[in-house]
Amino acid sequence: MKSRLFWIFAIIYSALHHIGSTSTTLKRPRAGDPFDTFPKNFWQEFSSPFTDTPEDEELEVTETTTHEPFPFFADPYTTVNISTQLSSNVYLHCRVNDLQGKTVSWMRRKGDELTLITFGQHTYSGDSRYSLEFEEPNDWKLLIQFANERDEGPYECQVSSHPPLVLLVYLTIIVPHVEILDERGSATPEKYYKAGSTIELQCVISKIPHPSTYITWRHGARLLNYDTSRGGISVKTDMLPGRALSRLYIANANRQDTGNYTCMLGNEITETVVVHVLNGEEPAAMQHANGTRYIPSPLTMVVFFIVCARVSLFQR
């Protein structure tokens, strides 16, 4: 402000000095004129409004905003298909990065209905086969034990962000097919062997995505795979892509080997065949090896009497 007052007084002095001049023509200022010492931008500043502006102007501050990291799934997909074998244990994975205090939940979807299974690390399902296992650094795994056909369907992993993140996992339960064949590859619910012969049964299991259990053979309630009391028992199992083949051999069969033989994959996948061991019976009797006497049906008796009556008439 003081600087501008000085220049104002200088202008007034110069104007008074030029009043006494007899010439009306505008002349260029002489050397040493006070105008020669004015700054080049004086008239621009002088024409601007007189405002008290601080000599050191404040620098304009640009405000920047930083957002917190948003949660996201570590895997690049939002829909997953998982297949598992009947009666096996299966994990449904949900990997979340930058969770930032948000909560992860697992839900079961049936149509438009959502059922809460887990919230955080707490399990709210009434089914004890369901549980949550967290694996560092970011995997919220839902464990389903002894999966059955009712467990098949869609599951959702949800993150409580805004908007919420949803990972859809569709679980498929594969039920293996079990069949017991004889040594000729024929399927039959009953099989007859002569005493002293070798019992040979084949257990063929198909639709096995991930064999997680071994195949066992039982005679009644007795486990045969590791049986050494009788002797002559052999079990050979081959795990093939998508299927399995197990063979049971029992040498020198006797009447005590008669009974139910069951092939088992786990505890729920089973198939049973009935084996009869006969001591010298004729082939006709082998079809009725249960020891009971054959009783013909009433229709058979009627046909028999008609045939006998006609034969008697022709003989007359």
Image (cartoon, rainbow, N blue to C red):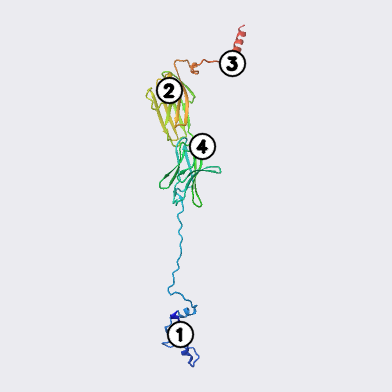
Amino acid type shown at disc 4: Arg
Q: Which residue is mark 1?
A: 9
The residues tagged by marks 4 and 2 sit, at their Cα atoms, a distance apart of 38 Å
Please tell me whether residue 222 is drawn above or below residue 292 in the rendered image: below
Amino acid type shown at disc 1: Phe
- Residue closer to the observer: 146 or 227: 146
Relative image position of residue 185 (x, y in whole percent): 46, 26
Please tell me whether residue 294 is drawn above or below residue 155 in the rendered image: above
Residue drawn at (44%, 27%) of the image = 202
Amino acid type shown at disc 3: Pro
Q: Which residue is mark 3?
A: 298
Q: Quadrant of residue 141?
A: top left
Which dot, 3 or 4, sits closer to the camera?
4
Q: CB atoms at circles 3 and 4 under 8 Å apart?
A: no
Decide which of tag 1 and tag 2 comes sooner along the chain. 1
Q: Which mark is residue 199?
A: 2
Crowdedness near tag 2: few (<14), some (14–19) or many (≥20) residues, C-alpha within 10 Å: many
Q: Residue furthest top?
A: 316
